[in-house]
Image (cartoon, helix red, strand yellow):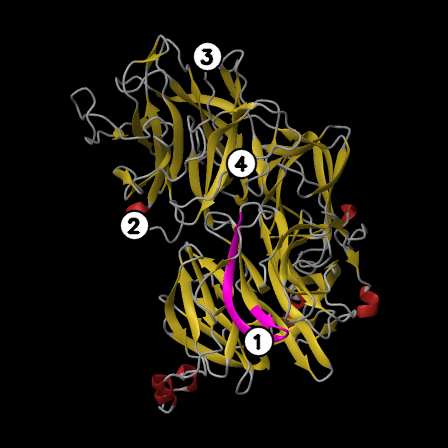
Amino acid sequence: MAKIPACSLSLMLLGWLFLGTNAAGAAKLLDVVKIWDQGPHNAFTDLVRWRGKWYCVFREADGHVGGDGKLRVLESADGKAWESAALVAESGIDLRDPHLSITPDDRLMMVAGGSVYKGKTLLGRQPRVAFSKDGRTWTPPQRVLTEGEWLWRVTWHDGRAYGVSYNAGERQSKDAKEAAKSDKPLSTAPADWKLKLVTSKDGVAWELLTHLGVPGHPNETTLRFLANGDLMAMVRREGGSTFGWIGTAKAPYKEWNWHETKYRFGGPNFIQLPDGSLVASSRRYLPKGAKTVVARMTAASYEPILELPSGGDTSYAGLVWHEGVLWVSYYSSHEKKSSIYLAKVDLADKSSGGSAAGQGKDALYIGDRLELFVDDFLIDKLTGTAARRLHKPTPREVVFTFDRPWEGNTCAYFTIFCDGDVFRMYYRGAQHDAMKPAHAEVACYAESKDGIHWTRPTLGLHDFKGSKDNNIVWTGPGSHNFTPFKDANPKATADARYKALAGGKGGLLALKSVDGIHWSLLSPKPVITKGNFDSQNLAFWDSVLGKYRDFHRTTKGVRDITTCVSDDFVNWSEPVFLQYPGAPTEHLYTNAIRPYDRAPHILLGFPARFKPATQQVEPQFMSSRDGLTFLRWPEPIIPITAPKDRDGNRSNYMAWGMVELPGKNGELSVYATEAYYGAQPGRLRRFSYRVDGFVSVHASSEGGELLSKPLIFKGDKLILNFATAPKGSVAVELEDSAGKAIPGFSLKDCQILRGDAVTQSVTWKGGSLAKIAGTPVRVRFVLRDADVYSVRFE
């Protein structure tokens, strides 16, 4: 499969046209490239970003209608070089209007129409669906719904698929004709045929939810669920005024409010941006021909703001919001042959300093989020002695000794988190004598007000050797590695506010609890079955991804870590191995991965590297921005020799948890085991990190510099987490994208920083940064005997 280079069009020749009536609606075309033209007629696109890659799907055929249309899938790692990944076909069927979605179990789903033509006369049609686990191998197209239906697009929400189908062969029934004569408002009057809101658990078996009362031959409809849970529809109409309609409904999505726009739609699509605004694309019908446009949209309005380079046979866009830029796939024949294009659009509101998107082709949009230097995401250049440096936590006190009869020297798999004004700890109670179990493993619970002094509440729930006077919370399947968390999913039910994974027979079991103490199975069968599971297998609600993430132990030649995702904690995607670019292949036991509370878009982990020769483990540090690719540092953060008794077999397991303790401002606490398999009871020791203090950019007394990539921020000040030696210093300059100091924000305008601060504002003679917010800037740090741990604009 040959790779197709992205041949950039000349923007100076094509230009761009602003159609908005005010600055807040402005948009700017950053880039447009042709990514495919190898078919005789290439049209009807969709675009999705999945597992860190781009996928674009469209129809290849001899013409706009008729023939045996095939569905081409393109794949790209960077959005620049595209490769044909698949060609989906069905003999005798014209496959058309393909759209992509991601299923709850993390597969790609394609929905398309399947038409039968004689010449260009349509004889029949029925929707098709196909699925893929890798974007390249697809299941054969499978018929869904009934003959004559046309399912336009599928949107997933809370584990279910939703779509709108229509059958142009249907005409008004007797009941519908009677309703049309009634005084019902236009918004509920029936059409010549009815739009059908349908839903499915698996994308194959569909059921009717309700009819949508849109008049005027409604057809192509895109559905999106908004952040507040409402459902919105964008509907094309070919009868009456022909103007497109926009509708909204609250659960259970049977009562709709409709608004007619001032524009016709063709290939309608829209998405909601992180700031809550809506952006759409459609065909615009103009006296001189059709154009593909980008538009601002609300529940009651649609207003084009930008024409994309297009003409003739055009439209049917795919929309993805990525790193502050709108990516748009579409097709057009303005260069004679109908081809597939990819555009990048800046939606920044320049009148308010850039509220939604980045300006500049390659600028990173960071807004006001905290950024750490755990990776090189922000870094363009490091010069002089400047380099990233890994920091190790400081050993503190032993906080727990496991000396109860149901505990012992192999207590392990600790989970620690803050829950209101209480710190909760869960762990395995276990003892081994001469490497053999001395009693059955149990799951235990402890709590603390300060994270240092812990108590075992007498729960009276489970018997141990004839007594319930203990702190045991679970003795069922999975006691070996019972790993709970408090569910941050706002839709979690009250009886499942706490959830857990536990390794049982056949895989990982899902458990639930109303209070974190009383537990029951959420599902009678294991919910994840592919893996080894003899480790601390964990899961949590990822608020950035909007799904549950799991990380569990498996084997790929060595002990390793895989991940999968879920919408409901019961149905999980296929496990995928983590990637560690540049790191050697090593045994990894526990992983302790979690979102960093101060920057939840970054995942931090403390995998336990197992050393078979000595049967020892030592924790490492790693980080990720996508949950799949992790930067793993080679040196251990807690060596096996320090502090005392850390050189025993399997000591040094890191607890899953990172907490800020009362009175320990500017400090984060983590915990690790001691004396595992030792002669004495096992122990848990606390260690402390500086807040954000995992990795810094450090320069010696000889000095060094860090230059950031171009980035877009919002806010009026820059906050640093830094520390210098007594004679050290930090100075900061803001430069434009061309590398020139911005007047008022140069090095000579900066007040030099010295000392040690977790949150310190940088000040310049230029004053507030609000005047340059929303425009691309580079941040230049000049360091001398200093460390910078994190940055934030606010």
Task: Look at 18% across and 26% down and name the residue there.
Answer: 468
Which residue, given by chain and number where applicable, does mark 4 sit on? 604
**Mark 2 or mark 4, earlier in chain:** 2
Rounded to the nearest whole Å, what is the CA distance between mark 4 and mark 1? Answer: 42 Å
Q: Amino acid at mark 2?
A: Ala
Where does the image place residue 765, in percent across and percent down from the top left? 73, 53
Task: Look at 43% across and 49% down and name the residue there.
Answer: 567
Residue sitting nearer the eye, 443 or 471: 443
Q: Tag on residue 302?
A: 1
**Mark 3 or mark 4, earlier in chain:** 4
* Residue 603 shows up from this direction: yes
Please rate how many residues cluster around mark 1, counting C-alpha atoms within 10 Å: few if below 14, some from 14 to 19, many from 20: many
Rounded to the nearest whole Å, what is the CA distance between mark 3 and mark 1? Answer: 67 Å
Which residue, given by chain and number where applicable, does mark 2 sit on? 494
Circles 2 and 3 in contact, beta carbons < 8 Å:
no
Which stretch is magenta? 116-132
Q: Amino acid at mark 1?
A: Tyr
Rounded to the nearest whole Å, what is the CA distance between mark 3 and mark 4? Answer: 26 Å
Which residue, given by chain and number where applicable, does mark 3 sit on? 648
Tell me the element at label 2: helix
Tell me the element at label 3: loop
Rounded to the nearest whole Å, what is the CA distance between mark 1 and mark 2? Answer: 39 Å
Q: How many marks?
A: 4
Q: Is residue 31 left or right of residue 486?
A: right
Q: Is residue 586 left or right of residue 566?
A: right
